[in-house]
Amino acid sequence: MKPKIAVIGAGPAGVACSVQLARFGYKPVLFEKDEIGGLMRNANCINNYPGFPDGISGLNFSKLLHRHLINYDIRIIKKEIHSISFVNNLFCIQLKKIVLNFNYLIISTGTKPIKPDGFSREKMELFSYDIVKHLNEKNKTFVIVGAGDAAFDYALTLSTTNEVTILNRSKKINSINELKKKVINNKKIKYLDNTSIIDITGDESSIIINAIKNGREKLEIICNNLIYAIGREPNLDFLDKSIKSKMDKLKQSRRLFIIGDASGDKFRQISISSGSAIKSAMELHSYLLNSQAE
């Protein structure tokens, strides 16, 4: 009987791993609470993935990922996972109403945003951390906080139909030069360095930002939407202590794999995530073959 394998998260890593497992003849079950593609759906243009010399948008790339899953008849469960525990030698995936058990667990849940300090829960509801829900908005004003690849890429995507201001609390830009040049040359994007937010007020349609530039100049910025893109960290909150307490042992025994950006690799690229995912699928297959031979 084939082992029951669960893959959590349908970004590039989760899709690549699921497809490779299907090619080996397994029937992985892929869990995804949102849309196929994960955070990649936010990407303005993917320029460094082989096979797309003219680039491809994150949304279109995600559609291709979905087609790949369909071609291999991979089962997708589109429900939110409340927790995953390890009980009686099985991984127990707790959904809202049912628990599903698996022999092997592959985690490809990507990252979660690092949240800013100093804001009340009510004020934190005024901003978001990605732009998927804003992709169809037009003639709006956006403020994006951050100076890395994500912040600059978000700005470029939104600027096609909106006005965007980027706030960087320092002078250092962490984005790659390609994105930096595009942002600086974009007339619909305003860039302010050495600018820190002191307070925000307003509602979901109109946000008033009180900020200080260069430590002394007071600014008031009014926008429709505020996006924080100040960094990300592995998204593993759903793991029960029964897994966290024996994480290394489960990995060494090839029962648990953490792949893609969820692994904590600081180099977050689609090609790296996909490659590590396929490698993990091959390692699991090799382990299972050797186990059967013994």
Image (cartoon, grey):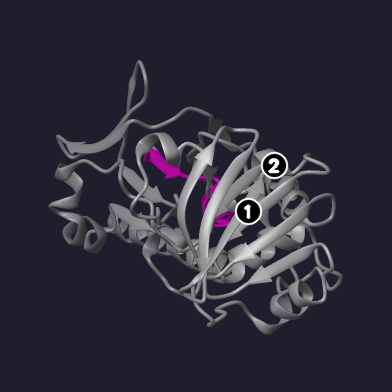
Residue beneath label 1, please? Answer: 221
Q: Is residue 203 rendered to the left or right of residue 248?
A: right
Identify the element where label 1 is drawn. strand
Lower sequence index among marks 2 and 1: 2
**In the displayed structure, would residue 204 be above or below residue 112?**
above
For residue 291, what is the image quadrant?
bottom left
- Measured as percent of width and height from the top left, residue 113 is found at 44, 54
Element at badge 2?
helix
- Residue 263: within the magenta? no
Question: Which residue matches tag 2?
Answer: 134
Residue 224 sits in which quadrant? top right
Q: Distance of mark 2 from mark 1, alpha carbons?
A: 19 Å
Tag on residue 170?
none
Q: Which residue is drawn at 73% across and 48% down?
A: 141
The residue depicted at 20 percent of the width and 56 percent of the height is 247
**Closest to the observer, 114 or 212:** 212
Is residue 23 visible in the rendered image? The answer is no
